[in-house]
Amino acid sequence: MGESRRFANAEAHVTMRRMSTTTSPGPTPSGGGLRHGLMLVVALAFLTAIGLVLPHGDSGETFRDALLAHALFLQVVIALWAIVIVEGLLGLFVSQDDWPARLKRLLITSLLPPLRMIISTSTPPGWLWLPGAGWKPAGEETSEKLEQRLALPMVILTLLVLPVLGAEFAGGETLDNHPRLALATHLTTGVIWIGFTVEFLWMVAAAPNKLAYCLRHWINLVIILLPLVAFLRVLNAFRFARMIRAGKLLRAYRLRGLWMRLWRLALLFNLFERLQQRDPAKYRAGLEKKIAGLEAEISRLKAQLAEFRARTGEE
């Protein structure tokens, strides 16, 4: 009975795994391509605004301060935010699922407008609208195709970290003495951060197991979160600057520099990892290892099945 129970559990596990990767989330949504395309642009614009004011290194401080102090920048950010909220409210009356699910999606996109790239109040759960591909069900097949589609652009984007490191480390005071080079370095690192964020959001949305994807690609999450942590710490230091000593503010800047060094190291690590994945020999070895593991699992299940049949036959 113990063997039969283990076999049943294993069979149920395999069956559930197949169902999780092949079951359709429901009927394919119709239309809405133009609206979702426009909202993708709005969400990307909001994410770009965030990327421009985040610290990505020792460059661009003057540009960031000027941008934050400019009234038009704040007005643009508020306008983009309002567009996301209004579109979400209108989408409540288009969706076909239950109201709690619609309101949950509205709350998420209202608090985090860049997430409008992957979810909306009018989109049923389990579906993604991809530019150039239309509606696709979230799952293993969509995740693999999306990963293949983004692989080469992300390698090229990650390679941009090399000239950035060269500009920041070569010459000591080079960036301080060359404002244009400092601005170019800051904009380049901003583009890198935006690209990593967009890729991570799309891949998490398409992944069949979102938590497993986050754990497997933790370095990408570190690259996205470190500039946000550094920015929030500096804002907190400015907020209480009148209440604390100047040394506290200086230490906050030094800590921000530490965060940015960690960010650059994470980028280099990610670059090596992506280049390794592009190596055909290592990619083939990885596939062969996966196939061997699956064959071993099949052999084990067949042995359990044969043993189970032999015992039930004896009985």
Image (cartoon, rainbow, N blue to C red):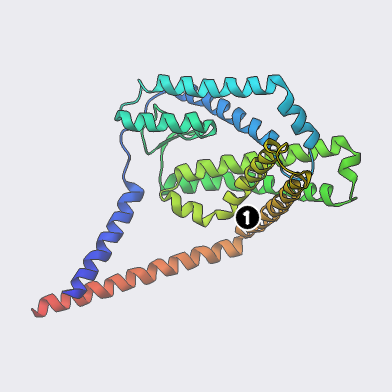
Instruction: Return the residue at label 1.
Output: 274
Q: Report crowding for label 1: few under 14, some 14 to 19, many 20 or more residues within 10 A (C-alpha).
A: some
Front-most of residues 96 and 133:
96
Question: Does any portion of residue 132 appear in the rendered image?
Answer: no
Please identify the quadrant where the N terminus is shown: bottom left
Q: In the rendered structure, which amino acid carries the disc numbered 1?
A: Arg
- Horizontal side of 276 relative to 189 (left or right) equals left
Q: Residue at x 83, y 39 (%)?
A: 182
- Horizontal side of 55 relative to 46 (left or right) equals right
- Horizontal side of 175 relative to 227 (left or right) equals right
Residue 216 at x, y percent in the picture: 51, 57
Front-most of residues 54 and 216:
54
How many marks do you count on the picture? 1
Question: Is 139 placed above or below 281 here?
Answer: above
Residue 113 at x, y percent in the picture: 53, 30
Q: Residue at x 51, y 41 (%)?
A: 202
Residue at the limit of the structure toward the left, as seen here: 315
Q: Residue at x 48, y 45 (%)?
A: 204
Question: Is 21 placed above or below 122 here?
Answer: below
Question: Does any portion of residue 151 appear in the rendered image?
Answer: yes
Q: Quadrant of residue 88?
A: top left
Q: Residue at x 41, y 42 (%)?
A: 138
Tag 1's secondary structure?
Answer: helix
Front-most of residues 172 and 160:
172
Residue 304 at x, y percent in the picture: 25, 74
Question: Is 219 placed above or below 58 here?
Answer: below
Residue 206 at x, y percent in the picture: 45, 43
Please identify the quadrant where the C terminus is shown: bottom left
